[in-house]
């Protein structure tokens, strides 16, 4: 017996962990700094970490099926109803839920390239087709309504990542509105704001109040530092309220994740420290890296270094793990996550030494 034909599917390749790199190079993990996966430089919210510890003895219980406490807290945060909040097992789980709710076999989704590969991966799992719109270095990774609309041909879902990974750019809210206004009524505009806390631009959730074809995606992985718990959510139109129970998997968001997320939401000190340090790190890298960079509104910076794979390997040998963007179709670029001040300064100094040699 064999699985179904998966030849059209690709493997999701995450950045290597410190442990993996240390094992490969035969070195102590303590020698490395990881600035490759856009994780929180300060770790998890301390309030969330305390809640996880206190909740460990309840790990044998299932969470509540509707995760109502956390949904109500998120609804209050975003000024929506709790029925508009779809919790899931990470941002990828949210994408799966949207596809379950919308896609029929043979439908199409429109995704950015380069971009988060799971948009297309999940669509194909749901027997949909994938079309792409290009975001290129030729115009500095400009993110405009025109770029999307030129590629649009009636797809069921359009993915907009803002801030965009890996470029760091963002869509203006007027462009999101234009895309929604000039596409068909049955086209969903899915705005992925995984890095939204790091930008001072308004969230597209403001449009959710006025339209039935906008959904906004968020995650606890970045600003809240809970990537290992896998907790994400979507803010959807009010008309979608009944669909959540029909697409939600049994207890998808774990008890520990939901309790930690609730605690992290109230830990303003941790979030503010994270956002401010990321801003400082972006500005420092932009000013002192001796190579072209692109304006970023996320917790990372894209740097044009020439031969990315060689640069990333040299950085790794010197104890700094960064992201070689060759697999994203950018063989001349590396992406560096915003670290602490000491980590950032060390990464910049190391990169400049490599570039100068």
Image (tube, helix red, strand yellow):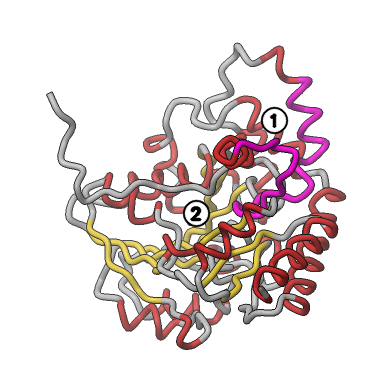
Residue 193 position in % (x across, y down): 57, 60
Which residue is disc 1 drawn over? 259
| Among the two numbered marks 1 and 2 on one chain, the one whose residue lies closer to the N terminus | 2
Q: Is residue 161 above or below residue 71?
A: below
Residue 51, picture quadrant: top right
73 vs 161, nearest the viewer: 161
Q: Residue 236 carries which label?
A: 2
- Rendered view: 248 above or below 10: above
Q: Where is residue 178 in the image (x, y as percent from the top left)?
A: 45, 81
Q: Which of marks 1 and 2 is in front?
A: 1
Numbered label attached to residue 141: none
Q: Which residue lies furthest to the left in this view?
A: 1
Residue 27 sits inside the magenta stretch: yes
Residue at 63% x, 41% y is 18
Q: What residue range appears in magenta? A: 26-54
Compute the Cα span from label 1 to label 2. Answer: 22 Å
Quadrant in which the C terminus is drawn: bottom right
Answer whether residue 174 is magenta in the image.
Answer: no
Going 78% across and 61% down the picture, which residue do you hit? 344
Vertical arrangement, residue 243 with respect to residue 336, above or below: above
Q: Can residue 272 be seen in this view?
A: no
């Amino acid at each position: 017996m064999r699985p179904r034909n998966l030849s059209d599917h690709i493997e999701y390749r995450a950045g290597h962990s410190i442990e993996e790199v240390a094992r490969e190079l035969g070195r102590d993990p303590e020698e490395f700094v990881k600035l490759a996966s856009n994780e929180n430089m300060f770790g998890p919210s301390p309030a969330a970490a305390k809640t996880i510890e206190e909740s460990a003895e309840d790990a044998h219980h299932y969470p509540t099926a509707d995760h109502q406490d956390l949904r109500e807290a998120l609804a209050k945060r975003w000024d929506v109803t709790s029925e508009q909040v779809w919790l899931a097992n990470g941002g990828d789980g949210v994408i799966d839920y949207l596809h379950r709710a919308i896609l029929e076999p043979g439908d199409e989704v429109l995704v950015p390239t380069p971009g988060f590969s799971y948009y297309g991966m999940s669509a194909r799992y749901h027997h949909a087709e994938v079309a792409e719109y290009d975001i290129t270095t030729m115009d500095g990774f400009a993110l405009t309504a025109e770029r999307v609309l030129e590629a649009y041909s009636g797809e069921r879902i359009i993915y907009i990542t803002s801030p965009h990974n890996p470029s760091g750019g963002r869509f203006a809210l007027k462009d999101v509105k234009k895309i929604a206004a000039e596409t068909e009524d049955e086209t969903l505009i899915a705005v992925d704001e995984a890095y939204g806390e790091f930008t001072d631009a308004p969230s597209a959730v403001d449009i959710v109040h006025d339209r039935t074809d906008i959904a906004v995606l968020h995650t606890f992985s970045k600003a809240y530092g809970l990537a290992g718990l896998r907790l994400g959510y979507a803010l959807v139109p009010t008309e979608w309220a009944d669909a959540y129970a029909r697409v939600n998997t049994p207890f998808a968001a774990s008890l520990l994740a939901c309790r930690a997320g609730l605690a992290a939401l109230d830990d303003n000190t941790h979030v503010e420290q994270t956002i401010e340090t990321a801003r400082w790190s972006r500005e420092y890298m932009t000013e002192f890296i001796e190579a072209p960079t692109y304006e970023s509104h996320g917790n990372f910076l894209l740097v044009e270094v020439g031969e990315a794979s060689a640069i990333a390997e040299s950085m790794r040998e010197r104890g700094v793990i960064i992201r070689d963007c060759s697999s994203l179709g950018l063989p001349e670029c590396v992406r560096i996550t915003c670290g602490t001040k000491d980590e950032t300064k060390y990464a910049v100094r190391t990169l400049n030494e490599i570039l100068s040699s």
